[in-house]
Image (cartoon, rainbow, N blue to C red):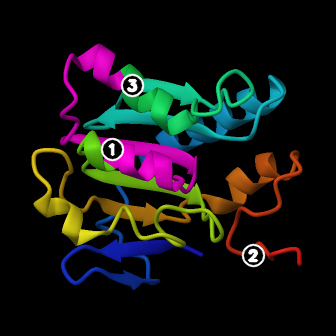
Amino acid sequence: MLVVMNILNNKTDNTLNMQTIKGYDKKIMLRCIELSQIAVNKGDAAFGSLVSLDGKLIAEGINNKNGKVSDHAEILALHNAHLKLGTTDLSECTLYTSCEPCPMCSFMIREYKIKRVVYALPSLYVGGHSKWPILQDEELEHMTPIFSNVPEILGGYMEEEANEVMKQTPLWMFGSDAKLNK
């Protein structure tokens, strides 16, 4: 299911807004999915992320949870973009990720002031957008200069393609059809 956040009224709009999808989104998301496959091949979880500026790749990250628990793909991509650009203000950048960012990554996205977030697989049980609304929390905007404005969010973009990689792992809790095992 494709989810587009309408940042004007902070409501979820399940209709596809073609203005929200940029011409380069598919190419960049395919790279995220490729990165998630690289992570799986290395024995880690299926998460890949990258930061772009005007459709150009700035930095990448793959999950390295086996090396360090906090080394999520999003955090590594954000950190690498910070190093490459020489600033923590990534307010003109887009973060792409194969799976919805968790709460930890969502706070980092807000601190790095990311303008736009595009993710493939929803994370209904541990997501920083669908479970805990950190990415769309307007109160954080008032905590300047630490946090940014609410980013534009495009969720569920190329979910089926990302799910093909996720199916290679025991992680059942990702995707719009995930069911809690009770």
Identified by mark 1, the residue type is Thr
The secondary element bearing badge 3 is classed as: helix
Tell me: residue 175, above or below residue 96. Answer: below
> Which residues lie in the magenta part?
81-109
Tell me: residue 95, above or below residue 40. Answer: below
Screen quadrant of the C terminus = bottom right
Taking 115 as reference, is 68 left or right? Answer: right
Residue 18 seen in the current view: yes
Q: Nearer the viewer, mark 1 or mark 3?
A: 3
Q: Residues within 10 Å of mark 1 (few under 14, many from 20)?
A: many
Q: Are marks 1 and 3 in contact (CB under 8 Å)?
A: no
Q: Which residue is identified by label 2? A: 177
* Label 1, label 2: how far apart the Cα atoms are: 26 Å
Q: Which residue is identified by label 1? A: 94
**Which is nearer the N-term, disc 1 or disc 2?**
1
The secondary element bearing badge 2 is classed as: loop
The secondary element bearing badge 1 is classed as: strand
**Which is nearer the N-term, disc 3 or disc 2?**
3
Nearer to me, 57 or 102: 102
> Where is residue 177 shown, x and y percent of the image?
75, 75
> Which mark identifies residue 79?
3
